[in-house]
Structures are given as structure tokens and as C-alpha cells.
Amino acid sequence: MKQVILFSTITDANSRTILSQIFSDTIQNKVLAYMPSDGVSSSTTYIEEWRSYAKEYGAAFNLVNNHSSEETEKVKLLDSNILLISGGNTFTLLNNLRESGLDHTVKEFAQKPSFVLSGFSAGALVLTPTIDVCNLPNFDDNLVDITDLTGLGIINFEVFPHYVDNLHEKIIKEYRLTAHYQVREISNEDFISLNI
């Protein structure tokens, strides 16, 4: 099984459905690689939350620091069969992945014969062909001044996380006029699940 799961955030309404797909019964000897967007300097609350989910679903837990280029981070990622890339600032996340070399390791992970690759918010955005959508108003600030907005291209469409009709409908309609790829909205309650 090769599955990609994209979502905006975990909520009370969607948590059981999303978690049961991330920790799919079809994956044997589950090992979750949890990659916070800001490396290990991210909030320990989220790290512990995902460690708890892993334990609940019988998975081992690997914390992957995308701010480090140490070989051990690549090994932890590739020794896993479930990868979750968290939300945060999309520009910073993409920059960290590139500088650490983990962008290539995530692509290598996606070539495994069986895996679940999941990203939420910024983590979903970096899996797309481009993070151009992040330049829209009220999105992420480009804190690292990157100009190449090419994503990892694991999936062949763009996503717009945290989509709310009455707030984003006009913005996304205008963006689609110039976008080079299909753009799919993901509300805070929704998710996209793909078998690839």
C-alpha cells in the first residue's frame, strides 16, 4: 500500500478517521517518523501528542529533525513506514528540507513499496509541485527569503489548507486563473486520501 494523506489540522470531528488512515492496519510493524516543520525546536506539546497517537496505534516513534543534515535523521526517516510532516511556516519548512537534504530523503521514502506519507497544513503544501499558494494574502510570511517555490512534487496538484468558503472563495478563484496545477481546498474538517 502506498498512501498519501493531506489535511489541515486534527479536530475532534476528523481525528479518528485521519488517524486510522495514517496508522493503517495494512501497515505491519508500524514506525512513525514525525517531522515537525521547525525541526526539534517545535513545541513539545505537538511532539508528545503525536508520540501518544503512535503509542495508541501500536507504532514505534522516530522524531526527525529537518533542521539537521546528520545522516541519522535520514536513517530514522527511511527506517519508518509512516511519515508525518507537521504544519508551521511553509517557507521555513521547505528551506529546512532543502538545507538538510531531507527533501531528497522524503522523495526516496515515497519510492518504498509500502508506506503512508501524511502532511498537514505546511506539511501538505510541501508535498505539492509548488508552494506558490503561500504568496496569497494572509498566508505564511517568507521568513527565509526563498525564491524557488518548487515543492517536492510527491503529488501532482496544489492544496489550499484551512479553506473557509466565505473567506477564501474569491482569492482561490483568482489564484486558479494563473495556477499551473489543479488546486484542491482542504477545510479544517476535511482531508484528502490518495492511493498512489
Image: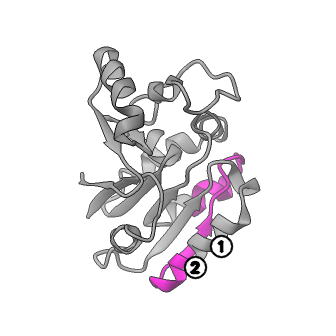
Task: State whether residue 145 is above or below residue 50.
Answer: above
Q: Residue furthest left?
A: 195
Quarter of the rendering containing residue 147: top right
Name the residue at the front extreme: 166
Q: Which residues are magenta?
A: 53-76
Query: Could you say which disc has been placed on residue 7 in the image?
Result: none
Q: Amino acid at mark 2?
A: Ser
Query: Which mark, residue 48?
Result: 1
Q: Quadrant of residue 94?
A: top right
Q: Is residue 67 magenta?
A: yes
Residue shown at the point (48%, 57%) measured from the top left = 9
- Asked whether 182 or 71 is in front, the reply is 182
Q: Secondary structure at mark 1?
A: helix
The quarter of the picture where the N terminus appears is: bottom left
Q: Is residue 41 magenta?
A: no
The numbered dot on residue 52 is 2
Q: Are the residues at dot 2 and dot 1 in contact (C-beta closer than 8 Å)? A: yes
Q: Residues within 10 Å of mark 2 (few under 14, many from 20)?
A: some
Alpha carbon distance from label 2 to label 1 = 6 Å
Residue 81 spot, x, y in % from top left: 43, 66
Identify which residue is drawn at 61% across, 41% down: 93
Q: Nearer the viewer, residue 64 or 172?
A: 172
110 or 127: nearer the viewer: 127
75 or 25: which is nearer to us?
25
Q: Label 1 sits on what residue type?
A: Glu
Whether residue 156 is visible, yes or no, is no
In the shown orientation, is residue 54 left or right of residue 130? right
Q: Position of residue 70 (x, y in %)?
A: 71, 51
